[in-house]
Image (tube, helix red, strand yellow):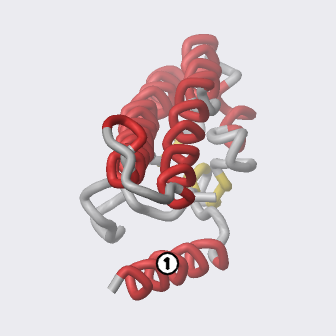
C-alpha cells in the first residue's frame, strides 16, 4: 500500500513537471506570462506595475515574501533527518530516539512545514492582487489577472496545484 501511494505521488509530480507554468494576464487583448520563473513570480507584470509607485512597492513586497525562508528549509531538513535516523535505527530504544517517534515526528514536521509554506504563499497572492488593483485604478491599459485562478481551474483543497 505504501508503494502504491509513493508511485501515485511520483506520477503526479511527473505530470506537473511536464507542464510549463502558465499563469497569464490579459493586457490589451494579449496574454502576458506573469511569472518569469519560480524565483521571480510576478516579474512579467513589472513593466506595467512599475508605472504606478504603489503597485511597484506591492510587487516588490510580494516578491520579497515569496523567497524561500531559512525557517522552512531548516525545519524540512530536520524532519528529513529525523525520518532518515528512524529508518536507520535498529534495536528497541526508549524515549526520544525510538524508531517510531523519529519516523512519525519527522513526517509530521515535514507535513506541517509544507502546509505552512503553502498557506503563506496563498495568502501572499493577495498582495499581487492588490498591486494589480492599484495599477488598474490609475493607469491603462487594464490588467485582467487574478492570482487565485478562475472557476475553470480544478485542484485539491489543501493547496496542491500547478507550479514551477
Q: Is residue 23 above or below residue 120?
A: below
Q: Residue 157 at x, y = what percent?
A: 25, 59
Between residue 68 and residue 70, name the one nearer to us: 70
Mark 1 — residue?
A: 12
Q: Quadrant of the C terminus?
A: bottom right
Question: In front here: 151 or 49?
Answer: 151
Question: Where's the N terminus, which quadrant?
Answer: bottom left
Question: What is the x, y in percent for residue 55?
Answer: 56, 20
Q: Quadrant of residue 154?
A: bottom left
Asked whether the viewer can see residue 26, the reply is: yes
Q: Residue at x 59, y 30 (%)?
A: 74
How many marks do you count on the picture? 1
Q: Is residue 91 above or below residue 8?
A: above
**Is 98 left or right of 82, judged from the image as shown?**
left
Is residue 15 found left or right of 86 in the rendered image?
right
- Above/below status of 121 relative to 49: below
Task: Please state if 54 lies on the left or on the right of 46 as rendered.
Answer: left
Residue 119 point in image, percent of width and height = 36, 38
- Examine the image and state in which quarter residue 41 appears: top right
Q: Residues within 10 Å of mark 1 (few under 14, many from 20)?
A: few
Amino acid at each position: 500500500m505504501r508503494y502504491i501511494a509513493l508511485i501515485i505521488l511520483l506520477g503526479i509530480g511527473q505530470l506537473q513537471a511536464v507542464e510549463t507554468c502558465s499563469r497569464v494576464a490579459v493586457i490589451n487583448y494579449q496574454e502576458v506570462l506573469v511569472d518569469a520563473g519560480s524565483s521571480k513570480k510576478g516579474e512579467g507584470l513589472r513593466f506595467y506595475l512599475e508605472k504606478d509607485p504603489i503597485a511597484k512597492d506591492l510587487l516588490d513586497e510580494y516578491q520579497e515574501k515569496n523567497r524561500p525562508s531559512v525557517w522552512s528549509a531548516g525545519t524540512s531538513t530536520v524532519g528529513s533527518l529525523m525520518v532518515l535516523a528512524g529508518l536507520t535505527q535498529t534495536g528497541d530504544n526508549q524515549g526520544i530516539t525510538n524508531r517510531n517517534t523519529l519516523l512519525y515526528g519527522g513526517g509530521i514536521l515535514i507535513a506541517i512545514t509544507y502546509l505552512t509554506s503553502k498557506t503563506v504563499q496563498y495568502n501572499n497572492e493577495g498582495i499581487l492582487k492588490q498591486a494589480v488593483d492599484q495599477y488598474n485604478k490609475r493607469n491603462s491599459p487594464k490588467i485582467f489577472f487574478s492570482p487565485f485562478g478562475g472557476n475553470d481551474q480544478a485542484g485539491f483543497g489543501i493547496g496542491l496545484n500547478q507550479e514551477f
